[in-house]
Image: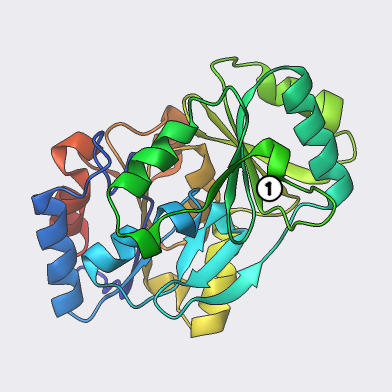
């Protein structure tokens, strides 16, 4: 007999979304079927809610979103923050200075806005997102010059880089005291949050808040920032395009995100 999984958690990029950053029709139908069967659906993403909320509305979800890899948990529909952990201002200041000195392409997430470096190419993802949503759902976007590091709460710093050794360099240069968590979320993306933050931690917090049984929880993901979530949930399903490290600890491997792997995984392992 197949175990009854009541709570299903999806990562967005590389998982629920295809390479065009869309939810395929197959995935949409499978998620609708889960809802019909009274399953509770959650999103757990490295993205800020400011650039992920449209997917909550697209799928008609009423559940809170785990955002910024667990640093932010928010009920998007009611604009209610359930949990937030910020980087201390000394650490944030040090990291932002390092990024500027090394002319890195980076974004800074505060509760209400996204700030970008002058040279940022990654900012185009935010601009593209803003172009696909109504005005009230657009993420407020500013250059890094407008950010007052000491006065603003900083939830996450995102760096776009192809340098595989950058995480090591960051840990050596700006994280000797371990005040932040540094993790890869995509091949060329590095996410920085305050120490102890992870999607797994976020899932634990949400589980306590909503009385969710983690033994009845299934998760889908594709990258290093999903590892902690796979370690917490009863059932873990890695995408066909997932990092090898994640595939090794997954219970199952489904098709890739461009082949509607979420839909395939839902029908094969959950329904």
Q: Is residue 271 visible?
A: no
Measured as percent of width and height from the top left, residue 76 is found at 43, 71
Q: Residues within 10 Å of mark 1 (few under 14, many from 20)?
A: many
Residue that sits furthest to the bottom in the current view: 211
Q: Nearer the viewer, residue 153 or 237?
A: 153
Q: Identify the residue at horizontal 14%, vertical 49% (top origin).
A: 264
- Which one is nearer the viewer's eye here, 250 or 102? 102
Count of picture labels: 1
Residue visible at 30% across and 40% down? 239
In the rendered image, the quadrant that contains the C terminus is bottom left
Give the vertical position of 222 relative to 23 (above or below).
Answer: above
Please name the residue that numbered disc 1 is placed on. 193
Q: Is residue 8 left or right of residue 86?
A: left
In the drawing, does residue 61 fall left or right of residue 64?
left
Residue 106 at x, y percent in the picture: 61, 31
* In-image side of 199 versus 56 (left or right): right
Position above or below: 217 against 109: below
Foreground residue among 165 and 218: 165
Q: How is the image coloured?
A: rainbow
- Helix, strand, or loop for circle 1? strand
Measured from the top left, where is residue 98 in percent x and y?
A: 79, 26
For the N terminus, the quadrant is bottom left
Counting from the top left corner in percent of width and height, residue 235 is at 37, 59
Left or right: 175, with 190 as reference point: right
Q: Nearer the viewer, residue 207 or 245?
A: 207
Asked whether residue 62 appears in the rendered view, the answer is yes
Residue 105 figure quarter: top right
Quadrant of res 104: top right
Query: Residue at the spot x=72%, y=46% of the render?
Result: 147
């Amino acid at each position: 007999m197949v175990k009854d999984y009541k709570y299903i958690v999806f990562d967005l990029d590389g998982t629920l979304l295809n390479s065009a950053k869309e939810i395929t029709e197959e995935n949409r139908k499978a998620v609708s079927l889960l809802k019909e069967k009274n399953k509770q659906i959650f999103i757990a993403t490295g993205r800020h809610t400011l650039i992920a909320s449209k997917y909550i509305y697209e799928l008609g979800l009423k559940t809170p979103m785990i955002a910024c890899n667990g640093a932010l948990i928010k009920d998007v529909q009611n604009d209610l923050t359930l949990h937030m952990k910020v980087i201390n201002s000394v650490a944030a200041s040090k990291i932002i200075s390092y990024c500027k000195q090394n002319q890195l392409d980076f974004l800074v997430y505060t509760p209400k806005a996204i700030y970008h470096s002058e040279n940022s190419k990654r900012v185009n993802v935010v601009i593209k997102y803003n172009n696909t949503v109504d005005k009230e759902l657009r993420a407020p976007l500013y250059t890094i010059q407008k950010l007052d590091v000491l006065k603003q709460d900083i939830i996450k710093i995102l760096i776009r880089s192809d340098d595989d050794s950058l995480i090591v360099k960051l840990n050596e240069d700006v994280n000797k005291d371990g005040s932040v968590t540094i993790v890869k979320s995509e091949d060329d993306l590095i996410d920085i949050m305050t120490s102890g933050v992870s999607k797994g931690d976020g899932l634990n917090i949400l589980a306590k808040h909503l009385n969710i049984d983690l033994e009845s929880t299934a998760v889908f993901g594709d990258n290093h920032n999903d590892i902690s979530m796979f370690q917490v949930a009863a059932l873990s399903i890695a995408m066909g395009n997932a990092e090898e490290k994640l595939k090794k600890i997954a219970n199952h491997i489904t098709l890739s995100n461009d082949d509607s792997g979420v839909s395939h995984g839902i029908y094969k392992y959950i329904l």
